[in-house]
Image (cartoon, coloured by chain):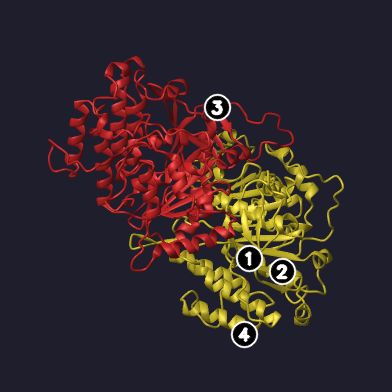
Chain colours: A yellow, B red
Amino acid sequence: MRIEIPREFERFGPIMFYDVQKVYELDSGLIYKKNETKPEEQSVIKRISYESLQEIQEQMAIIVPVRNEKIKLIEGVLSGIPHHCQIIIVSNSSREEVDRFKIEKNALEHVGAFMKKNLLIVHQKDPALGKALASAGYDYILDEDGIVKNGKCEGMILSTFLAHLCGKKYIGFIDSDNYFPGAVHEYVQEYSAGLYNSKSDYSMVRIAWHSKPKIVESNLFFAKRGRASEHTNKFLNQLVSHYTGYGTEILKTGNAGEHAMSMELAKNLDFSSGYSIEPYHFISMFERFAAIHDNPLPEILKQGIEVYQIESRNPHLHEVKGDEHVKDMSKAALEVIYRSPLAPESLKKEILEDLFFRNIIESKEEMKKEVVYYPAIVNCDLKKLQKELQNQPYGDQLTLDLSKYKPSKKEGLKRDQLKGKPVPEEKNYLEAK
Amino acid sequence: MRIEIPREFERFGPIMFYDVQKVYELDSGLIYKKNETKPEEQSVIKRISYESLQEIQEQMAIIVPVRNEKIKLIEGVLSGIPHHCQIIIVSNSSREEVDRFKIEKNALEHVGAFMKKNLLIVHQKDPALGKALASAGYDYILDEDGIVKNGKCEGMILSTFLAHLCGKKYIGFIDSDNYFPGAVHEYVQEYSAGLYNSKSDYSMVRIAWHSKPKIVESNLFFAKRGRASEHTNKFLNQLVSHYTGYGTEILKTGNAGEHAMSMELAKNLDFSSGYSIEPYHFISMFERFAAIHDNPLPEILKQGIEVYQIESRNPHLHEVKGDEHVKDMSKAALEVIYRSPLAPESLKKEILEDLFFRNIIESKEEMKKEVVYYPAIVNCDLKKLQKELQNQPYGDQLTLDLSKYKPSKKEGLKRDQLKGKPVPEEKNYLEAK
């Protein structure tokens, strides 16, 4: 991969946001070539060798959430994931009346055998998983029967646990409804490039789509951004500006479903439900770690959090969803900004107006609460979780070495407790400039 | 790349056609990994390491024909081509009133600098090229002013010369109207995989598209084959069956625009104009080399010609062309089958009927001659060609070592001379079974 180094950045406390990076070559070859002296070229364009990318991928889990997608489509997605990534499929496909999950699992294991890969395939509502989570002290996503609830966010939390237990250092997400395996391949290469470049143990890569083709009058039109993204990015940037004192447009990936993180960062971020999960990465990062004082992870002050945004070369073409979907997405994204204790009154007012004028909410005065928050997974008892799952068919894939691990005694912090408390005073942010 | 080995093959004289191969992983990693003993696994699924693919790419020229495409689109295509391939852009963009070629060349050289690649960019109608071809004895594609004519085929002939003069062992073609750089990357990887697998110096790889999405009622429908291809493949297979005596469906890539060849094969094939150029690869191969007796290249009898067909994972999504385009394409493809001295009367009759019932020709009795044939480039005087071009700006990229080369005294054989003559008797084919 040949990629420009970021031209701009914005700092918010210990968090560094890098501007969108352009990719010049998807594939720039091996390091060790005759006539090449420098292993990696140092210039404003950086060449990242295939070996370096594979090095990251050997430590990466790629999560593919599945819900009743066609098996052919999923098979295509899997074929695009570089071999050395551990694939984790978290399915919430229906099990009644036809057991779609069973068919799916059989078919994908079959494909996995052809790929010589050991896929980790679980069902979101497997009672064993619910039980294990409960015993580990993470019952937030369970229903009254002790089963993991429906929902994308709940599946992502579950998969973050699993990736962690697989002993992986990085976690990346790939949607299962992508028609272009070549785009999937590109996303994973870009995750790897960003994570390879990061100097911090706390890093994140988000993909900014090159374009999002839409069918307009029987032709394709290549829109630059999705419809929901424009609004999400605008308000996220306003929130950052409010604290840094400088207007900015640096955040361009508020709704990026394609993203990857170091496990160190992933396990320390809170979650929010539904379509708000991606923008909430930013909000959680701000709430937990933007402060210089009261930062719950002193190590983050030392190393910083690095957020890379990489512009994919492939357009993003996926299953067509309707206008309602865009509205739901926009509402959820703006709700987590609105409800953050960090959001100043002026910003909250603007968000309500924006949603009202787009006919997404009915009143300019208030917004119905729909989002649910879940705490970071960091304070769970991983030992108990591992023990509970070791008798599962996939138990031997959960290879994290916990021999020296001591579970924290703190319970996972509930999001409601945030209000006022660990959220720092405004002045702390100002000092961070 | 992880790819199945071909399950079926069909032999026609010294030509081996392999059935379509399925790709399981676009990217299967490096050879040299700890815990891996075998450099390449031997099984019905073959793993081809990244190193092996790059080895082929270092010897490959990728031709990108351009004609007034948007520069952004071309830039995307270039970003998908693996770094070590030599890119040759043969443009026939308009030079009046705006000199589009000049803008294009500047922009692409700029992009090339970012990629640290030396692109070879020429204009099809550059008088220097016409002059050089004439002095080398290949004036077939020149107009009365000594300039290369318009046309895709004429551009491909020109680019085959250039790739040869660049000293490349392989040549591959990539259309410049592909929206998905990830698909471009896949095609080149698959060219490399096929050529790597070939045991013969005479080999060809053709891409069978996974699917060809069409916009149907504002949604995407994934058709398995293009509309013209079905007919082309059917008649090509019938032609093969006629000589082998066995019905076959082995040929599935009659119209494959995405293809690559060893230079040894490329320089020995004749060309035909317009949309017929791709199916004519097969026809020319049959006419020239299917015979056991009278084969103009004894080496081919020894080594054989290997034709691989690889099914791409990415759908093929390109600029939408209308029904007329499909009809023109189908007419051209079937015309070269029809006009081959190898075509038996029964097949010729069927072709006329097929075209008539599809409203492509007006009479069931005859077909207007539209296709033009050009001879293989093998008998040209390469030394003269190289000498004429060495003062061009790109002269130092034409690095083929011709110190020991002796031009053949035979003139390039005109296609008309084929009629009856070097085309073998039917019995020769039958012996070849």
Residue at which label 3 appears? B44
Horizontal and vertical percent for residue B258?
A: 42, 43
User: Toward which corner of the image does residue A14 lie, by quadrant?
Assistant: bottom right
Q: Nearer the viewer, residue A77 or B276?
A: B276
Q: Residues within 10 Å of mark 3 (few under 14, many from 20)?
A: few
If the image is split into quadrants, where does the C terminus of chain A sit?
Answer: bottom right
Does residue A66 appear left or right of residue A60 in this picture? left
Q: Residues within 10 Å of mark 4 (few under 14, many from 20)?
A: few
Distance of label 2 from label 4 (alpha carbons): 25 Å
Q: Nearer the viewer, mark 2 or mark 1?
A: 2
Q: Which residue is mark 1?
A: A372
* Location of mark 4 (residue): A346
Q: CA distance from mark 3 to mark 2?
A: 48 Å
The answer to whether residue A177 is seen in the rendering is no
What amino acid type should be assigned to the residue bearing mark 1?
Val
**Spatial CA span between label 3 and label 4:** 65 Å
Q: Give the amino acid type for the residue marked by disc 4 in the picture.
A: Ser
Q: Whole-percent x and y of residue A200?
A: 76, 60
- Spatial CA span between label 4 and label 1: 24 Å
User: Answer yes or no: do the residues labelled 3 and 2 have beta carbons within 8 Å?
Assistant: no
Q: Which chain does the residue under circle 1 lie in?
A: A
Are labels 4 and 1 on one chain? Answer: yes
Residue corresponding to mark 2: A16
Q: Taking the image as drawn, is residue A194 in sight?
A: yes
x, y percentage for residue B407?
43, 34
Q: Secondary structure at mark 3?
A: loop
Instruction: Pick whichever, B298 or B343, lies toward us.
Output: B298
